């Protein structure tokens, strides 16, 4: 039964009207055009993402280098107890300022 349906469809497609053939051809061209545009857009997107990743990696390396040589880092390493006290005091102050009464 499925074979009969396929044969009917194939026969019907061969005897399609000129309007149907023109419409089908126009639709195929539209799909091909859309496919080419999407492909170009994908390539541009990949290039942009690659450039962004490289830029972010450079910025991350630069920030890490600055942190390694910063005075804050060296103070925190030399005075861990004072650093913890400062962080606690800052947290308590911020909490009291943001508390709604």
Image (cartoon, rainbow, N blue to C red):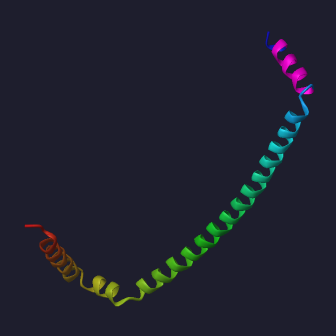
Residue drawn 83% across and 39% down?
23
The residue shown at (86%, 42%) is 25
The residue drawn where x is 38% and y is 88% is 70
Q: Position of residue 29 (x, y in %)?
A: 83, 48
Quarter of the figure with the N terminus: top right
- Mark count: 0
* Residue 30 left/right relative to 47: right
Nearer to us in this view, 98 or 6: 6
Residue 23 is covered by the magenta coloring: no
Q: Quadrant of the C terminus?
A: bottom left
Left or right of 63 in this view: 21: right
Query: Percent position (x, y) of residue 84?
Result: 20, 77
* Quadrant of res 94: bottom left
Is 11 in front, or is 56?
A: 11
The prevailing secondary structure element of the residues shown in magenta is helix
Is 21 situated above or below 36? above
Quarter of the image where one finds residue 80: bottom left
**Residue drawn 56% across the image and 79% down it:** 58
Left or right of 63: which side holds 57?
right
Magenta-drawn segment: 4-14
- Toward the left, the furthest residue is 101
The location of residue 91, given as percent across then percent down, is 18, 74
State the residue in front, 95 or 65.
95
Q: Residue at the top extreme?
A: 1
Q: Residue at the far front: name it.
A: 19
Residue 80, compared with residue 11, is above or below; it is below
Residue 9 within the segment the image draws in magenta: yes
Front residue (pair 5, 16)? 16
Q: Determine whether, in the image, residue 62 is placed left or right of residue 79.
A: right
């Amino acid at each position: 039964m499925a074979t009969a349906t396929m044969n009917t469809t194939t026969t019907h497609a061969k005897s399609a009207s000129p309007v149907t053939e023109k419409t089908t051809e126009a639709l195929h061209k539209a799909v091909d055009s859309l496919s080419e545009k999407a492909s170009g857009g994908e390539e541009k997107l990949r290039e942009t993402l690659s450039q962004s990743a490289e830029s972010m990696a450079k910025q991350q390396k630069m920030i890490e280098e600055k942190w390694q040589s910063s005075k804050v880092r060296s103070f925190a390493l030399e005075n861990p107890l004072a650093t913890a006290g400062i962080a606690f005091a800052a947290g308590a102050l911020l909490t009291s300022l943001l508390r709604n009464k």
